[in-house]
């Protein structure tokens, strides 16, 4: 099983990472042929996803007496393919600028003031990932005319409908949400998710699961193409952790734990016992699968680092505060569409606010504290109450 997870993770990172790098190169060079190639690859992937999640299960499992579920999966896979294909249309992306933060093109005098900084303060290249994940960067005067062209990515933050990188980011978000729902449906819903944790978790599996959300965003913001490592860290908001930052993380963690306790207690009181047990079986199974403090530490750390770098570090500057929080909440399908989803949305908004007010590093620490406290208490006390209160994100 671990070998299968390793191979699938490597393939996922290689394929998606290759597309992201190609999109970065296309934006940097302004190469329409390469952009067309990226679009073509995404179209092929759309068709493959419909076949893998829709047609294949319908053809191979139709005799199992679950035709309605398989038809539902086929319909959902088709919708996924249609939405992902629509995202490849520039007209559709232009319309999405009403929802996502609009790209803010800097004034020419401000831009020239930026590129005229002393050599030691300026970068040697143009902004990377023109906003798949927004940021601040500088460029040489020689690049200024090119970068001020309307068809080229700017160094300002926001969603750029003409950027190949932002197009890929949008399509990948559709994939992420769509495959989460499809896996949930094909796996048998909450009961199936709970069974998935029955074999327990290992350090190796936890580390592997976090790699796509870590590697792809780092490549997405242009590491090795438009940015060096220091610039990538700046773009992702991975600044130094100060004493104030630790205090903010601890304070926000306490506030979130109170929120979860209050909402969770109200939820339990208002919900019939059998319904409540069904709605929380997946989260309880996940908590039960963490049997040692070491596993609690690894799970809390891997989730915090990979998810915060991906969502708050890379995506939030492009797709905005609210959209990023909603995407984050919907990716946690172990809670399905229960009151727990609203709790996770509140937690995501808190992390997003920290990213805007401080930096991604503080959001990572807050995320880690939030997860680790419940997991560690569950290991130490083995309390069922802690299992359902500990909504792990």
Image (cartoon, rainbow, N blue to C red):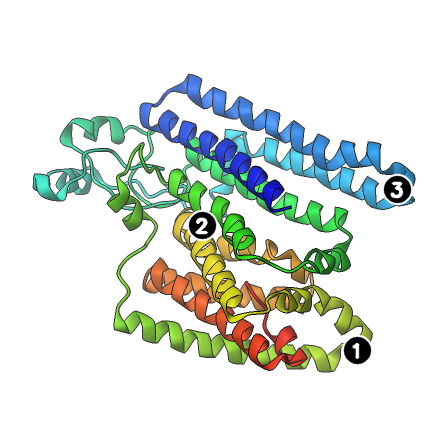
Drawn side of residue 22 relative to residue 181, left or right: left
Q: CA distance from mark 3 to mark 1?
A: 30 Å
Residue furthest to the top in view is 33
Residue 162 visible, this angle: no
Which residue is label 3 attached to?
A: 67
Element carrying mark 3: helix
Q: CA distance from mark 1 to mark 2?
A: 37 Å
Q: Position of residue 243 (x, y in %)?
A: 26, 73
Determine whether 116 is above or below 265 in the image. Answer: above
Disc 1 to disc 2: CB gap under 8 Å: no
Residue found 57% across the figure and 37% down from its top? 7
Drawn side of residue 354 relative to residue 73, left or right: left
Residue found 50% across the figure and 37% down from its top? 13
Which residue is label 1 attached to?
A: 273
Element carrying mark 2: helix
Determine whether 359 is above or below 160 in the image. Answer: below
Residues 281 and 20: in front is 281
Badge 3 crowding class, 10 Å Cα cut-off, few under 14, some 14 to 19, many 20 or more, is some
Earlier residue among tags 2 and 3: 3
Badge 1 crowding class, 10 Å Cα cut-off, few under 14, some 14 to 19, many 20 or more, is few
Which residue is label 2 attached to?
A: 310
In the rendered image, the quadrant that contains the C terminus is: bottom right
Drawn side of residue 24 relative to residue 229, left or right: right
């Amino acid at each position: 099983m671990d070998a299968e997870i390793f191979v699938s993770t490597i393939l996922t990172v290689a394929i998606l990472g290759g597309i992201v790098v190609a999109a970065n190169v296309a934006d940097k060079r302004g190469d329409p042929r390469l952009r067309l190639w990226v679009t073509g690859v995404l179209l092929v992937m759309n068709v493959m996803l419909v076949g893998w999640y829709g047609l294949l299960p319908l053809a191979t499992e139709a005799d199992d007496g679950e035709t309605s579920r398989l038809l539902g999966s086929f319909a959902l896979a088709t919708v996924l393919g249609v939405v992902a294909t629509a995202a490849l249309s520039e007209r559709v992306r232009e319309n999405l600028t009403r929802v996502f933060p609009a790209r803010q093109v800097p004034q020419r005098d401000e831009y020239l003031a930026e590129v005229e900084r002393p050599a030691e303060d300026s970068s040697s290249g143009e902004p990377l990932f023109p906003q798949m994940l927004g940021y601040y960067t500088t460029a040489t005067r020689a690049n200024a005319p090119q970068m001020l062209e309307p068809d080229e990515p700017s160094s300002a933050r926001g969603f750029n409908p003409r950027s190949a990188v932002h197009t890929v980011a949008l399509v990948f978000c559709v994939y992420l949400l769509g495959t989460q729902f499809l896996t949930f449906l094909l796996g048998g819903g909450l009961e199936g998710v709970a069974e998935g944790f029955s074999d327990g978790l290992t350090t190796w599996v936890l580390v592997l699961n976090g790699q796509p959300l870590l590697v792809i965003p780092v490549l997405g913001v242009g590491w090795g193409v438009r940015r060096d490592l220091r610039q990538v860290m700046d773009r992702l908001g991975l600044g130094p952790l100060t004493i104030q930052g630790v205090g903010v993380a601890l304070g926000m963690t306490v506030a979130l734990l109170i929120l979860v306790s209050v909402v969770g207690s109200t939820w339990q009181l208002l919900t019939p016992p059998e319904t409540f047990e069904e709605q929380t079986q997946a989260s309880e199974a996940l908590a039960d699968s963490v049997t040692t403090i070491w596993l609690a530490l690894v799970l809390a750390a891997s989730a915090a680092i990979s998810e915060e770098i991906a969502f708050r570090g890379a995506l939030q500057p492009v797709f905005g505060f609210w959209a990023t929080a909603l995407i984050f909440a919907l990716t946690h399908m172990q809670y399905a569409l229960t009151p727990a989803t609203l709790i996770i949305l509140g937690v995501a908004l808190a992390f997003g606010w920290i990213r805007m007010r401080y930096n991604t590093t503080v959001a990572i620490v807050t995320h880690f504290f939030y997860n680790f406290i419940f997991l560690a208490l569950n290991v130490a006390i083995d309390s069922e109450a802690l299992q359902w209160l500990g909504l792990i994100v």
